[in-house]
Image: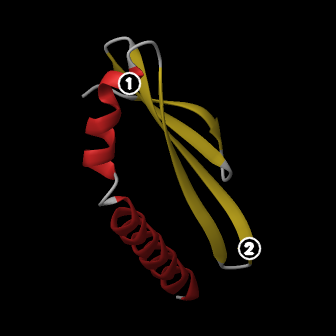
Amino acid sequence: MRWHIRDVRPGTSFVIDMPLVDAVLSFEWDFEPLSNHRTRLTQRIVLSGDNATEYADHVRAGFGATLDDGMRRLADALVKAERSMQRRDDR
């Protein structure tokens, strides 16, 4: 699959677009600071275009059941990376 990143706002948000035949599957990522070391990470999946209805069932099947677990794994990886950077800075 081909994809590209657009609308990058460093530290705030970005969008990943996956072009399909007469449709686009977009993943909109937002980062909302909550406190010094906490951020709310949200992802919105948007299917648009003239042929979007043809892909809707495939998108639901491909992402519906795994989205929560995938977001949890990503959040855990980000926490681990931050802790690693903090340990390095403490040296």
SS type, badge 2: strand
* Residue sitting nearer the eye, 21 or 57: 57
On screen, residue 29 above or below 86:
above
Residue 30: image tag: none
Residue 21 image offset from top left, x and y in percent: 31, 13
Residue type beneath disc 2 = Leu
* Render colour scheme: secondary structure
* Residue sitting nearer the eye, 14 or 27: 27
Residue 53: image tag: 1
Query: Residue at point 48% right, 77% down?
Result: 79
Crowding around mark 2 (Cα neighbors within 10 Å: few <14, some 14 to 19, many 20+) is few
Q: Split into 4 quadrants, where in the image is the N terminus? A: top left
On screen, residue 78 above or below 20:
below
Q: Please identify the quarter of the rendering in which residue 80 is found.
A: bottom left
Asked if the residue at tag 2 contacts the one at tag 1, i.e. Cβ–Cβ closer than 8 Å, the answer is no
Task: Decide which of tag 1 and tag 2 comes sooner along the chain.
Answer: 2
Mark nearer the viewer, 1 or 2: 1
Left or right of 33 on screen, residue 62: left
On screen, residue 91 above or below 30:
below
Instruction: Report, in whole angstroms, how far the alpha carbon at label 1 lies from the one at label 2.
Output: 36 Å
Residue 34: image tag: 2
Q: Please identify the quarter of the rendering in which residue 53 is found.
A: top left
Query: Residue at point 32% right, 39% down?
Result: 59
Residue 35 image offset from top left, x and y in percent: 75, 78
Residue type beneath disc 1 = Thr
Query: Residue at point 38% right, 15% down?
Result: 51
* Residue sitting nearer the eye, 45 or 1: 45
On screen, residue 19 above or below 75:
above
